Image (cartoon, grey):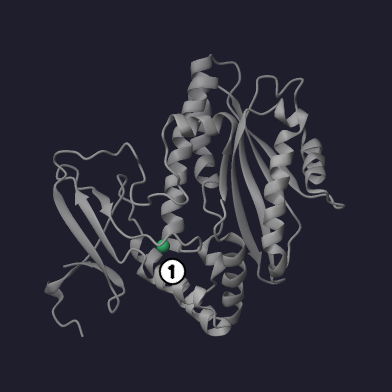
Amino acid sequence: MYSSESNYSIFQDKTATGKKRDWKGKKVRSLLMAAHYEGLEKRTGAPYYGKKAEKVCDCAECLAFKRDLETGRLRLYQAYFCKVRLCPMCAWRRSLKIAYHNKLIVEEANRQYKPAWIFLTLTVKNVEGDDLKQTISDMMKGFNKLMKYKKVDSAVRGYFRALEITKNHEENTYHPHFHVLIPVRTGYFGKNYINQKEWTSFWKRAMKWDYTPIVHVQRVKGKKGIDAEAIEQEVRKEMEEQKAILEISKYPVKDTDVIRGNEVTEENLDTVYYLDDALSARRLIGYGGILKEIHKELNLTDAEDGDLIRIEEDDDDVANETFEVMAHWHVGIKNYIIT
Ligand SMILES: [Zn+2]
């Protein structure tokens, strides 16, 4: 029993725009993920899953923030994150970090090169759980091949590539696909143009398939007939409007797509089993060409395996940021409390 409510208060964290940060929701989903890893340990007898269950269970148990006394905003400065690929808490932190990195990288690319941008979606046929891991390996190789084709190489300046996997729950199959953001060279919309059919046949050839995969290509549009600086602003605005960067910075699987509902079920255990096998110890995002160079120039850290505490790396300590807030996960209350 938690008799006296005056002993604690419920922790709250809001963004600059007043939106609530859902620490509690992510922690609840992470604990559910931990329960599935426990379930897999029982099912298989493999201690590997038990260890993962423990890690995920301990993720973000205690959060230490500094509060800016002027704005009242909180900045996380200490926490343990488990970094398990399928942990919803860590996936959330990673996608925030990737989105922040991509925003900086795109802005810098626009400043230096003023490229036009396209989005490419490269898909494969749905696969059974047992084939998922190998299919993803093949796609990684296929993607590298695709980027080296002469016509592609002379049309693009680089890429940001993100893997996403969705599940078809009716057919019990998996749908891995790549979302790719590409700055193209001057002339892409002229003599070096690659149309959707060509992208499709290049992807088919790179994957050595006998079937024709679905490929989407879409231009991120700026407006015509305005001066260069205005175009840059226009492109940036356009990209923000389309939520393009956020869209592509999502970490590969939605946790609500991995685990359906709020209980450990046989189907959920299967999904966790296959996705864990396919995604563990694998790089799921990648940068190439000028985007890779800019990532390096800006000294950005690794968003997948690096620090998940600091999202905005230029977010330096400020003098008036002295007030500490400690939030602990309370198992009984199922929320973060401040004691
Ligand atoms: Zn975690």
| Residue 262 shows in this picture | no
- Image quadrant, ligand 1: bottom left
Q: Tell me which residue sits at (47%, 33%) in the image.
A: 296
In the displayed orientation, state which residue is furthest to the right: 210
Q: Nearer the viewer, residue 10 or 162?
A: 162
- Circle 1 packing at 10 Å, graded few (<14), some (14-19), many (20+), is some
Q: Quadrant of residue 60?
A: bottom left
Q: Nearer the viewer, residue 164 or 4?
A: 164
Query: In x, y percent, where is residue 103?
Result: 46, 36
Q: Secondary structure at mark 1?
A: helix
**Vertical relation: 168 (above or below) 231:** below
Q: Tell me which residue sits at (72%, 71%) in the image.
A: 171
Q: Is residue 32 left or right of residue 290?
A: left
Q: Tell me which residue sits at (47%, 27%) in the image.
A: 108
Q: Looking at mark 1, is its residue's CB closer than 8 Å to ligand 1?
A: no
Q: Tell me which residue sits at (53%, 15%) in the image.
A: 228
Identify residue for label 1: 29
What amino acid type is highlighted by mark number 1?
A: Arg
Q: Is residue 5 left or right of residue 62?
A: left
Query: In x, y percent, where is residue 42?
Result: 52, 84
Q: Quadrant of residue 292?
A: top right
Q: Is residue 94 left or right of residue 268?
A: left
| Residue 229 shows in this picture | yes
Q: Nearer the viewer, residue 161 or 11?
A: 161
Q: Nearer the viewer, residue 303 or 267?
A: 303
